[in-house]
Amino acid sequence: MEIIRNLLTDFEAYRTKDELAEYVHSIHNIIKQSDELKKLSRLKKGRLKQFWEELIPLYRYSQSSYANDNAKYRVVIGNQNYDAIELINGEEHRLEFTEFYNGKQDYQEMVSLNNGEHGVIVSDPIEDREQLLDGFRRNVHAKSLKGYVSTKIIFTLPLHKFHFIFEDDVELLKDELVQIIDDADFGDNETFLIMKGNSFYDDLEESITMVDGR
């Protein structure tokens, strides 16, 4: 789509953590000011899918204490077994991002929101804690079978989509998710958990946890 291509220029360029933060914030501000882009963004159309599911987690990781302050970062578009590169002193380190959510439910809700509808009934919703944990466990298990090599695997859970399930008990939920990741066999790969709110302006350091640093 032309409007998205014009928005996300130099999408795969290497950036320092500060340049990445500036780029992400500028794109987000442009989206907020355009009704058309907000609708496309909700549906994750075109490159906007990579923006939300890969570039935003990369930004979050780059701002954390687990990242190297002198590194440069870039998203990599394609079918390779990783989503981004962390370049440290000329050496490339792979990062893979995987966000857990009910894709069908999320899409139905976003279509309804774009149409001005609220409180729509969606099919096959995730309604309780066990459904959430079971779905997350299946997602983690599937990733553990991918055969990643020398890759930082970063799992992301959008808290705002499941707030009605865990309410204020975020720490207990985090402990359960960390245990699920830790129980899986990812070989020598490092694993992380990001629990993000509805805004990437929330506490970035608090939102990311290293599960296994190898």
Image (tube, rainbow, N blue to C red):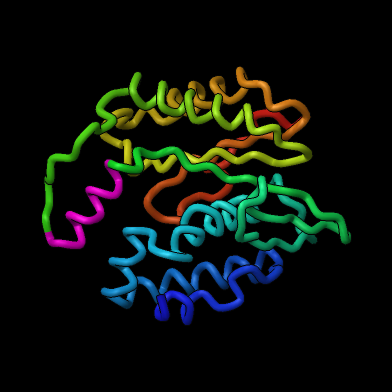
Q: Viewer-proximal residue, 143 or 158?
A: 143
Q: Is residue 203 left or right of residue 183?
A: left
Residue 183 rendering spot, x and y as whole percentages: 61, 17
Of 51 and 171, which appears nearest the observer? Answer: 51
Which is more toward the observer, 1 or 105? 1
Q: Quadrant of the N terminus?
A: bottom left
The extreme front residue here reads 79
Residue at (62, 50) in percent of width and height: 61
26 with respect to 115 (left or right): right
At x 45%, y 58%, the residue is 49
Q: How many marks?
A: 0
Residue 121, by quadrant, is top left
Range of residues picked out in magenta: 105-116
From the top left corner, tell me how far across and down residue 199 is, in percent.
41, 55
Rendered image quadrant of residue 44? bottom left
Question: Does residue 177 appear left or right of residue 123 in this picture?
Answer: right
Q: x, y (%) of residue 112? A: 17, 54
Q: Is residue 49 above or below residue 190?
A: below
The C terminus is located in which quarter?
top right
Residue 201 visible in the current orientation:
no
Q: Quadrant of residue 162?
A: top left
Q: Is residue 44 visible?
A: yes
Left/right of residue 16 with respect to residue 27 in the rendered view: right
Task: Please name the residue shown 43% across and 65% down the image.
Answer: 46
- Magenta run includes residue 94: no
**Residue 159 coordinates in the image, percent (x, y):** 38, 40
- Main SS of the magenta part reads helix
Residue pictured at 12% horizontal, 45% vertical: 120
